[in-house]
Amino acid sequence: MSASSRIPVIAQPFVSDRAKQTLDLVEQFVEKDCIPVEPIFRAQLGEGQQRWSTYPAIMETLKTKARQQGLWNMFLPKSHFSQGAGFSNVEYGLMAEYLGKSTIASEATNNAAPDTGNMEVLAKYGNEAQKKQWLAPLLDGKIRSAFLMTEPDIASSDATNIELDIRREGNEYVLNGSKWWSSGAGDPRCQIYLVMGKTAANNPDPYQQQSVILVPAKTPGITVHRMLTVYGYDDAPHGHGHISFKDVRVPVSNIVLGEGRGFEIIQGRLGPGRIHHAMRTIGAAEKALEWMIARINDDRKKTFGKHLSSHGVILEWVAKSRIEIDAARLIVLNAAIKIDQGDAKSALKEIAQAKVLVPQAALTVIDRAVQAYGAAGVSQDTPLAYLWALIRTLRIADGPDEVHLQQLGRRENRARKDEIVQKLQWQKEEGARLLEVSGLKSRL
Ligand SMILES: Cc1cc2nc3c(=O)[nH]c(=O)nc-3n(C[C@H](O)[C@H](O)[C@H](O)COP(=O)(O)OP(=O)(O)OC[C@H]3O[C@@H](n4cnc5c(N)ncnc54)[C@H](O)[C@@H]3O)c2cc1C
């Protein structure tokens, strides 16, 4: 069965024939060109400091193959941008699921974070000179980028806490402060940082204090101190950098959109990006389920004389995983359709639902697959341990679950409380009145 024939019924009316054909090509590219060469990619990573000064040559071969098939920049939605491959969010969402089954397919098709979000920022908010200098080579896959918001000394899930100082001096801005978890900053091809900091720390409106500014990675005064690990994985060659800025100077023309517009930019950046992460996560969960099914039918590894698949509890894991993945996919596609019909702002609730639910569902599925493999499940002999580490971070990155739940809960409560209280009160009174009229009150 091809990928296009598995599109959920609810999404089918929103997917063009061209998108269906591309979806099938993406599936084939991921399964046949990307997954088999992942060991080569890993083997081509350097040792020690070389992990951050080189990158695997196989990636360029894959990029060429992807471009030849038109599998390039599918993430940029056609409704807002002319520079992409011309798909909607729901169409690309379906493709992103397959990209999520491989650790290298997103980059091979130029759909990898954080570049995707950064390209959207530049396409949406950048001026012509910024687009020419930075967006063009990013779209071409020639350079990479990083988004620097999170800081080591403050709680960054409340972005009003951000402290990095951006001070204007004549025709320049001067930056001082620290950032960490700067994903992609370890990659030798990373040439541009999008940095969030404060241009007006004393502005009484905390949402007007921040700005986003473009800083070339090699600007004097920048020090990359170390690469952070995720449960021991360094994610080379891209990495997660811990970086400091000491009197770093850039021209005033490097500000994006204008001073005080930082919040507007990060909000615009994160909506579609969360859908991409969520759909890739669905792909990771599907991959875990595939590995689980392979293990529970392994002829060499029976317990108590039976395949694992002959034990009821294991079949229940398969069934529950199928239900949870399919339900999670519908939540994400619904959010993508809502963005397509309006914009990310009008789909805040649906995006937050997907952001919270999908990693939790996928982690449950991956954990069952790990369990089905026994000790092998936690080792390097299956992709499951790395998948778990990768997806676990999504409950923190781009804002932790708790922040999204608080906003969702607040919005749901505010929007519905008056109507619900009034309706239930009316139903109670109407029930009492009807009972009175019916003459049956004495029977209760
Ligand atoms: C793999 C990975 C990649 C990342 N990539 C990037 C990147 O490229 N660029 C970037 O800028 N950042 C990046 N981050 C950082 C990420 O966005 C932040 O870690 C996240 O926003 C949380 O901020 P914090 O770590 O400062 O946690 P804190 O803000 O200190 O929060 C700690 C914990 O407090 C709890 N909490 C917070 N708010 C509430 C609340 N309202 N109610 C109840 N509990 C609450 C949550 O459990 C939360 O996990 C990345 C993180 C990871 C793990």
Image: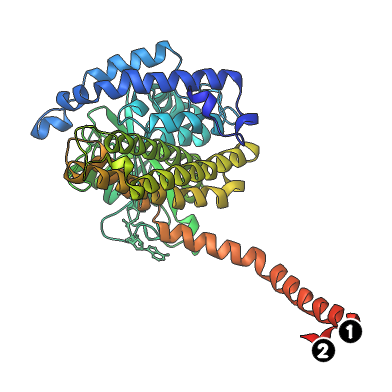
Q: Is residue 400 above or below residue 171?
A: below
Q: Nearer the viewer, residue 176 or 19?
A: 19
Q: Does residue 169 show up?
A: no
**What residue occupies the far top of the structure in this picture?**
68
Q: Residue drawn at (57%, 18%), measured in percent from left and top?
A: 18
- From the image, tell me which residue sits under label 2: 442
Q: Position of residue 395 (x, y in %)?
A: 37, 52
**What residue occupies the far front of the structure in this picture?**
305
Q: Nearer the viewer, residue 316 or 164?
A: 316
The quarter of the picture where residue 102 lies is top left
User: Where does the C terminus fall, quadrant-wise?
Assistant: bottom right
Per the rendering, the mark at residue 439 is 1
Mark 1–mark 2 CB contact (< 8 Å):
yes
Q: Is residue 122 above or below residue 233?
A: above
Q: Is residue 197 left or right of residue 349?
A: left
Q: Nearer the viewer, residue 402 or 207?
A: 402
Q: Position of residue 30 (x, y in %)?
A: 36, 23
Residue kind at label 2, given as amino acid type:
Ser
- Secondary structure under the numbered disc 2 in the rendered image: helix
Residue kind at label 1, given as amino acid type:
Gly
